[in-house]
Amino acid sequence: MLARSPTSHKGENGTVAVIGGSLTMHGAPLFSALAAEAGGVDLVYVCVPRIHQEVARMQSLNFQVRPFHGDELRPNDLHQLLELLVTIDCAVIGPGLDRSHEGLEALRELIDSCPRAMVLDASALQPWTLDAAKGKTVVATPHLGELERMGIEPETIGDASKRHGMTIHVKGHVDRIAGEDGKIVEVSGGNAGLTVGGTGDALAGLIGGLLAQHLDPVDACVTASTIIKRAGTLLFEQNGYSYTTREVIRLIPHLLHTLDANA
């Protein structure tokens, strides 16, 4: 599924930047970054609060950590972030970011100015998100509460996706994915163990990694959803509901490699 040239060089098979985290939340962007890495991308840049930069570095020797100036995303971070975004294939924006007025203003400007494909999750899902992201290659990954915050009714996601030219991936027991054409694809499976904190962040990171490897947005969403749900199924057989997002991420490479055989 993820074919690549045997003569390709470092960086040609996907580069992802994850922008997230806040003073009290370090795990969300790291789950996204680890999932993107597990999805097979060449390079992962992790942009997190300065207070969390050492924790981020310890999660993977491959992470290139770019800390914020302080412990929250602020307008003075935008210049260095946008300089980075010009060089990468896809940005995962929002996991763990604070939602203060100043933070949201910086976040909106970042989304509005981003020159690359984006996966928008968590704090990046606001009433203004659809307008800020219009005309860009974007996947939004809300759960039902975030979908409500965006001002979208569940039954209208197809219309919203088509009107704004983006893909909306609504997470749930059955994931519902609306592409830019308004058509909806559903992915079922998994179990209630996937309610553990961080699985949504992992999903966003994996989608970002697949987009960076040139999958179509809907295909990236369907593939990532299928992988996460299958991981939950396998882990339930071993551990019941007592499994973690880190365990889900560890299964991504194998499940991605064997996806066609298990289809």
Image (tube, rainbow, N blue to C red):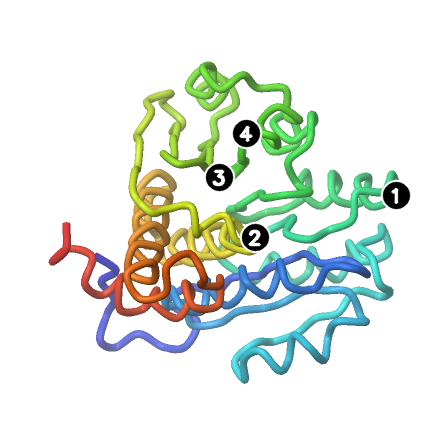
Secondary structure found at label 2: strand
The numbered mark, 3 or 4, whose residue comes first in the sequence reads 3
Q: CA distance from mark 2 to mark 1?
A: 20 Å
Q: Residue at x 73, y 59 (%)?
A: 25
Q: CA distance from mark 1 to mark 3?
A: 24 Å
Q: Residue at x 46, y 24 (%)?
A: 161
Determine whether label 4 and label 2 are within 8 Å by CB: no
Determine whether label 3 and label 4 are within 8 Å by CB: no
Residue 151 in the image, given as x and y percentages of width and height: 63, 19
The amino acid marked with disc number 3 is: Val
Tell which tag, 3 or 4, sits nearer the viewer: 4
Are there few (<14), some (14-19), or many (20+) residues within 10 Å of tag 4? some
Determine whether label 2 and label 1 are within 8 Å by CB: no
Nearer to us in this view, 85 or 225: 225
The numbered mark, 1 or 3, whose residue comes first in the sequence reads 1
Q: CA distance from mark 3 to mark 4?
A: 15 Å
Pointer 4 residue: 144
Q: CA distance from mark 3 to mark 2?
A: 9 Å
Relative to 59, say whether 176 is above or below.
above
Are there few (<14), some (14-19), or many (20+) residues within 10 Å of tag 3? many
Pointer 1 residue: 102
Relative to 225, say whether 262 is above or below.
below
Which quarter of the rendering shows the N terminus?
Answer: bottom left
Pointer 2 residue: 92
